Amino acid sequence: MEFSHVPVLLNETIEHLNLKAGGVYVDATLGGGGHSEEILKRADCRVVGLDQDEDALNHAAKRLAPFGDRFIPVKSNFRNIRKVVYRLGLDAVDGVLMDLGVSSFQLDNPLKGFSFQHDGPLDMRMDPQNPKTAADVVNTYPEKELIRIFYEYGEERYAPQIARAIVKRREKKPFTSTLELAEEIIRAVPAKARREKHPAKRVFQAIRIEVNDELSSLEEGLVGAVEVLKPGGRIVVITFHSLEDRLVKNFFRREENPCICPKDFPMCVCGKKPRLKVITKKPLVPSEEEIEKNRRAHSAKLRAAEKLSFA
Ligand SMILES: C[S@@+](CC[C@H](N)C(=O)[O-])C[C@H]1O[C@@H](n2cnc3c(N)ncnc32)[C@H](O)[C@@H]1O
């Protein structure tokens, strides 16, 4: 299968990473290697590229082979960024990029089971070694738990109706394919909801987040990223839905202003010191021109922050 993924907010990412010759940058979501390639072209630096999907990693390693030992591929979840950096014998790095979610390659490959439009196995694992698949979630989670996931991770208003329909149907025959599930979701929502976005979009997002434990990975990855950054180093995060964006925004805010003392205290006694300065007070979004060329970019938001010198 052809690997095609157009990097989102490419110039904005490069600009906010503030690249310098001799620097070391972690691309924590290597994917097709588009962002990494541009980083390697724009500065005489090194890139450590992480992905939990071995197919993505192998493809990107081939694409970036011309850069020789300036590119270091590592199969890992970015929640382990600290371990990866220290194992490579590095004390700290100059920048970290996270371009979240799945790549077009993963979405368009029916065998990975991410798409509600192409039929494939109910899988959705970015890392095939992860024991939990989408089929496990859909066929074994209690109804209450499905409702919670659809509400929390999909912000799906028809969560109870969809969860009920899934549980009723699986009692007769467990779900095995993406289209079976998508069709059941379509039947479960009221007719007016079928006219809006594809009714399965939010539920598929929710199941994908659950299968890959995406929000905890992100939280842990952000903590690790701040720790491995050198003073003055930058972290750039591109998100694709409001849950991720809120998590990043709140994390950056807490790191910029961590004091937990009551507001009426004359001075800080909690001792918590800021570690980041937020560079993007509002998130950057793609231009209309970029969205026209690449539909996938339409929900992207970029936030960047810099590690403080005394952190
Ligand atoms: C949106 S794509 C990145 C595309 C890339 N920036 C490019 O230009 O081609 C996201 C990639 O990150 C990987 N990924 C997502 N979450 C991850 C995590 N927690 N740890 C490691 N890799 C992750 C996915 O497998 C996918 O290949």
Image (cartoon, rainbow, N blue to C red):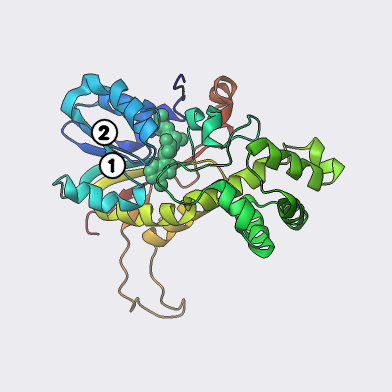
Q: Which mark is residue 19?
A: 2
**Res 232 seen here:** yes
Going by the numbered disc 1, the residue's amino acid type is: Gly
Q: Residues within 10 Å of mark 1 (few under 14, many from 20)?
A: many
The mark that comes first in sequence, 2 or 1, is 2
Identify the residue at horizontal 40%, vertical 46% (top origin). 129
Look at the numbered disc 1 and give the secondary structure of its residue: strand
CA–CA distance in space, label 2 to label 1: 8 Å
Q: Are marks 2 and 1 in contact (CB under 8 Å)?
A: yes
Quarter of the image with the C terminus in it: bottom left
Three-letter residue code for mark 2: Leu
Could you tell whether 64 is left or right of 176 in the image? left
Q: Position of residue 108 (x, y in %)?
A: 54, 27
Residue 153 place in picture, x, y as percent = 59, 53
Horizontal arrangement in the rendering, residue 146 relative to residue 263 (left or right): right
Nearer to me, 29 or 169: 169
Q: Which residue is mark 1?
A: 95
* SS for dot 2: loop
Q: Could you say where residue 172 lies in the image, as x and y percent from the top left?
A: 74, 51
Closer to us: 146 or 266? 146
Residue nearest the viewer, comparing 36 with 211? 211
Quarter of the image for residue 47 reads: top left
